[in-house]
Image: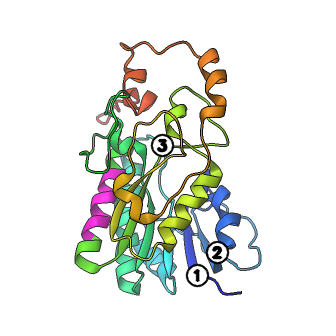
Amino acid sequence: MNFPIRRLLLTGAAGGLGRVLRPRLKRHCHTLRLSDRAELGTAAEGEELCPAALEDKRAIDALLQGVDAVVHLGGVSVEAAWEPIQAANITGVFNLYEAARHHGVRRIVFASSNHVTGFYRQDEVIDALAPPKPDTLYGVSKAFGENLSRMYFERHGIETVCLRIGSATPKPETRRMLATWLSHDDLERLVLAALTAPVVSHAIVFGMSANGTRFWDNRLAAHIGYQPKDSSEPWRAELEAREPMPDPQDINTRYQGGVFVTLGPYDTFD
């Protein structure tokens, strides 16, 4: 069998979405190299287990050796104190791109987040040209990753597709997810499109299924070729019956970031 990718690196492979993508991505490469700082289990046929901490520069440099492309899910994936976010999502993503430059890796799929733009209102529809309005330190760190990856494309030619992932769950669970839901099958389609499109340059794609309610417009990423097939619509009646109509004065339902807009603050001087 001919595979489009010889060796693919999946970071954050022990996390929630890493566990979803691990068996799916193996079908599309000859060797799947898996990394996380958490337990990765036992290697299946065609897998390489390479635990590493993103803030460990030497470990990440070794991790990228012999890799053709990267799906970077690693890092802190929720709001947290600044120190762990800085270590994994700031220093860590810098280490990843430096290692990619060092070893000649030409394509990275970067798991960004919808929380880069969480302070846009839910009655707005934005595209990739809308300036970032991060709702958390986590969102700020993902905006940093998007900007860093842009610099590495312009300076070193490393192509990146930044996936502003919405709510990647088995099914939508809240009214907000009627707009933000990304099915696991569509997540796979999105990542594969980002890996295999002939030319991506530096692109931002909102990670959502073909939902009836939308916060985001993906027309500027049409060249990636992502075609979602699922939709949150089958769950609309159930969710609208379960949850009352949102209060427009409630900050948690006013903005696209949902409850993230009120997480924190942090007592950094205690």
Front one among 33 and 206? 206
Front one among 78 and 233? 233
Start-end of magenta stretch: 142-151
Q: Check if residue 42 falls in the magenta segment.
A: no
For residue 242, say whether it is visible: yes
Q: Earlier in the sequence, mark 3 or mark 1?
A: 1
Q: Earlier in the sequence, mark 2 or mark 1?
A: 1
* Residue type at the position of mark 1: Pro
Front one among 210 and 81? 210
When the figure is inspected, residue 163 is found, relative to residue 171, above or below; the finding is below
Front one among 119 and 38? 119
When the figure is inspected, residue 36 is found, relative to residue 136, above or below; the finding is below
Which element carries disc 2, helix, strand or loop?
loop
Task: Provide the residue designation for mark 3.
Answer: 78
Quadrant hosting residue 201: bottom left
Left or right, residue 260 beside residue 152: right
Percent x, y of residue 108: 43, 70
Percent x, y of residue 179: 49, 35
Q: Is the residue marked by circle 2 packed among few (<14), some (14-19), or many (20+) residues within 10 Å?
A: some
Kindly indicate whether the residue at mark 1 contacts the one at mark 2 (C-beta within 8 angstroms): yes
Which element carries disc 1, helix, strand or loop?
loop
Q: Label for residue 28?
A: 2
Task: Provide the residue designation for mark 1.
Answer: 4
> If the image is split into quadrants, where does the C terminus sit?
top left
When the figure is inspected, residue 244 is found, relative to residue 130, above or below; the finding is above
Find the distance from the CA under tag 2 to the CA under tag 1. 7 Å
Which element carries disc 3, helix, strand or loop?
loop
For residue 92, say whether it is visible: no
For discs 3 and 2, the disc positioned in front in the rendered view: 2
